[in-house]
Image (cartoon, helix red, strand yellow):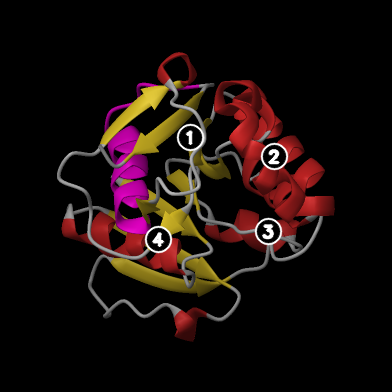
Amino acid sequence: MNLTVLAASGQTGIALTRQALRRGHTVTAIARDPERITVPDAPNLRKVPGDVNDAAGIAAVIERDSVVLSALGTDRAGILLTGARAVLAAGPQRVIWLGAYGTGASAEAAGEGARVLVKVLGDRLADKVEADNTVLAAGGTVFHAGMLADGPESPRRRTVGLEAAPPFDLGAKVSRETVAAAMLDEAEMPGFAGAVALPLAE
């Protein structure tokens, strides 16, 4: 499968890239500084520079038969919606987007515990919600992950929809490796097109 990883130099992006290669996929890994993509070179890996603020540049490296997996973070307000629009304008086959549990579509399911996250995000919350909604409206899948942590992929991991979402719990962390595996599962076998999915560690 032809996969494109956006924000491939971050911790989740590196996990996505590494696992995708391990699964035998062809990967285009995009980062503002490709030298920070700390995944060994491989015949089926292409590391390319890209900035979502440059929609034409993003369109030039995203192939139409690819599935885009985004690990784009909220380092500044406005970047997520800009990124979502740039990726969708490139016209990939599918988009699988990383969001945060307790925001937007998952806020009600998360319950009272998500209020802490909302305060932390501050003025970046609206950008995150708009980006998620833009991807969903285009038929993409948005993964709402809980608090991210380092560590291996959970052997008991599972992916559920909002109807089976547990209450938000700051102590219930999910590893980036687990999230990456769930996103790749969705790329290989779609089950949540146009919907929010939750990657759970157990």
- Residue 149: mark in rendering: 4
Q: Amino acid at mark 4?
A: Ala
Instruction: Work out how far the residue at label 1 is from the one at label 3, CA to CA, in angstroms.
Output: 22 Å
Q: Residue at x 44, y 62 (%)?
A: 13
Q: Secondary structure at mark 1?
A: strand
The N terminus - image quarter? top left
Q: Is residue 24 left or right of residue 136?
A: left
Q: Is residue 127 above or below residue 12?
A: above
Q: Nearer the viewer, residue 142 or 52?
A: 142
Task: Specify few, some or many for label 2: CA neighbours under 10 Å numbering under 14, 14-19, or 20 or more.
Answer: some
Q: Nearer the viewer, residue 34 or 98?
A: 98
Q: Is residue 51 left or right of residue 171?
A: right
Relative image position of residue 161 (x, y in whole percent): 43, 21
Please give the range of residues in magenta.
176-193
Upstream in sequence: badge 3 or badge 2? 3
Residue 135 in which image quadrant? top right
Outermost residue, bottom side: 35
Residue on which disc 2 sits:
115
Residue on which disc 1 sits:
94
- Residue 68: mark in rendering: none
